[in-house]
């Protein structure tokens, strides 16, 4: 298993070509020292600006909402789209909060639902596959869970060295290490060793190791089968895990009960079950989901693009 641990700051990262990146990270650190209500107000304002400027992403999010929620009227979808971009703006500062805030400040905004499921797994000496999703609070999700039980996050390495340094350092503030999303053997080994492994299978990764099952109102959505593969590890529990931004401020870390009869051995049923877990999380706060991603881009052979 090749774990990515908290990195060291090396002289090469201080090369002038990276100064603008350091300036951006420094500005983010400075801004997130502001009071939390100010950060959320700034985030909503930034989200309104992004909605005006990021036309391609707006088009993708609008189309996703049309596909996922066809029962909503055009006006209701427009309201949801606007609130989604407000959430996108807030997520910028929430990333800074997750990466830079001390534990005490994070804990002050944190509520936990389902902590007993973590305690039970630890008491039994079992690993935990944290079945999560790309809610816009995902950085805080990893940080907050790590305050309960430091674990290992599955991530995509950044090709920009300073951003890679920042994200690994930020994501390991309250967790042990990260593992590359392509390192399936490393993930399996972590679970066998009784670790908590954060895993989000809800993006479209193409046809490789995927099947087509329903996700919201789209009957054939490319869905990875890796969740069931990891769930087969002996003495590992599958716990739904995600974080919601609360209407009056603060966050709720939600940890669901272990999935029963999962995996069942049928890859279509197992993929559908993992999608249902994600759907349940998203429906609690649909404006907080990452609708900017082309979730439905991969189609069965011969079917036209939905975008």
Image: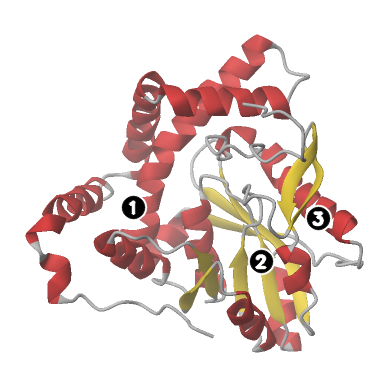
Question: Can residue 198 be seen from the camera position used here?
Answer: yes
Disc 1 secondary structure class:
helix
Crowd tier of the residue under label 1, counting other residues whose Cα lies within 10 Å: few below 14, some 14–19, many 20 or above? many
Q: Residue 128 location in percent, x, y?
A: 69, 75
Which dot marks residue 45?
none
Q: Nearer the viewer, residue 204 or 301?
A: 301
**Residue 143 in picture, x, y percent from top left:** 47, 63
Label count reads: 3
Which residue is under mark 1? 96
Which residue was labeled with disc 2?
130
Q: Residue at x 64, y 89 (%)?
A: 193
Q: Is residue 272 above or below residue 214?
A: below
Mark 3 neighbour class, 10 Å CA radius: few under 14, some 14 to 19, many 20 or more: many
- Mark 3 highlights which residue? 271
* 77 left or right of 92 in image: right
Q: Position of residue 257 (x, y in %)?
A: 79, 64
Quadrant where the C terminus sits is top right
Residue at the location (73% across, 51% down)? 223
Q: Nearer the viewer, mark 3 or mark 1?
A: 3
Residue 98 x/y as whole percent: 40, 58
Quadrant of res 100:
bottom left
Residue 63 vs residue 40, the one in the foreground: 63
- Disc 2 secondary structure class: strand
The CA span between labels 3 and 1 is 33 Å
Q: Quadrant of the N terminus?
A: bottom right
Distance in Å between CA atoms under marks 3 and 2: 15 Å
Residue mark closest to the camera, 3 vs 2: 3
Mark 3 secondary-structure assignment: helix
Indicate which disc, 3 or 2, sits on the residue closer to the N terminus.
2
Q: Earlier in the sequence, mark 3 or mark 1?
A: 1
């Amino acid at each position: 298993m090749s774990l990515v641990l908290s990195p060291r700051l090396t002289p090469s990262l201080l090369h002038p070509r990276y100064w603008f990146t350091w300036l951006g990270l420094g500005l983010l650190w400075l801004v997130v020292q502001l009071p939390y209500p100010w950060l959320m107000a700034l985030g909503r304002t930034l989200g309104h600006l992004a909605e005006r400027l990021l036309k391609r992403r707006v088009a993708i999010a609008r189309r996703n909402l049309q596909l996922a929620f066809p029962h909503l009227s055009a006006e209701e979808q427009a309201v949801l789209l606007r609130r989604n971009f407000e959430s996108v703006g807030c997520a910028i500062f929430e990333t800074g909060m997750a990466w830079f805030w001390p534990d005490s400040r994070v804990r002050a905004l944190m509520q936990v639902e389902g902590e007993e499921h973590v305690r039970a797994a630890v008491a039994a000496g079992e690993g935990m596959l944290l079945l999560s999703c790309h809610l816009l609070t995902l950085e805080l999700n990893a940080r907050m869970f790590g305050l309960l039980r430091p674990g290992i996050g599955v991530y995509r390495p950044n090709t920009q060295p300073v951003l890679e340094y920042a994200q690994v350092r930020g994501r390991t503030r309250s967790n042990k290490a990260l593992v590359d999303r392509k390192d399936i053997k490393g993930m399996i080994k972590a679970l066998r060793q009784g670790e908590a492994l954060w895993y989000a299978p809800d993006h479209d990764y193409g046809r490789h190791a995927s099947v087509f099952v329903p996700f919201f109102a789209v009957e054939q959505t490319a869905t990875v089968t890796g969740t069931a593969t990891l769930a087969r590890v002996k003495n590992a529990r599958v716990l739904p895990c995600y974080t919601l931004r609360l209407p009056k401020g603060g966050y709720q870390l939600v940890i669901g009960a272990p999935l029963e009869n999962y995996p069942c051995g049928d890859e279509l049923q197992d993929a559908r079950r993992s999608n249902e877990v994600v759907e349940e999380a998203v429906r609690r706060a649909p404006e907080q989901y990452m609708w900017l991603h082309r979730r439905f881009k991969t189609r069965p052979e011969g079917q036209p693009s939905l975008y």
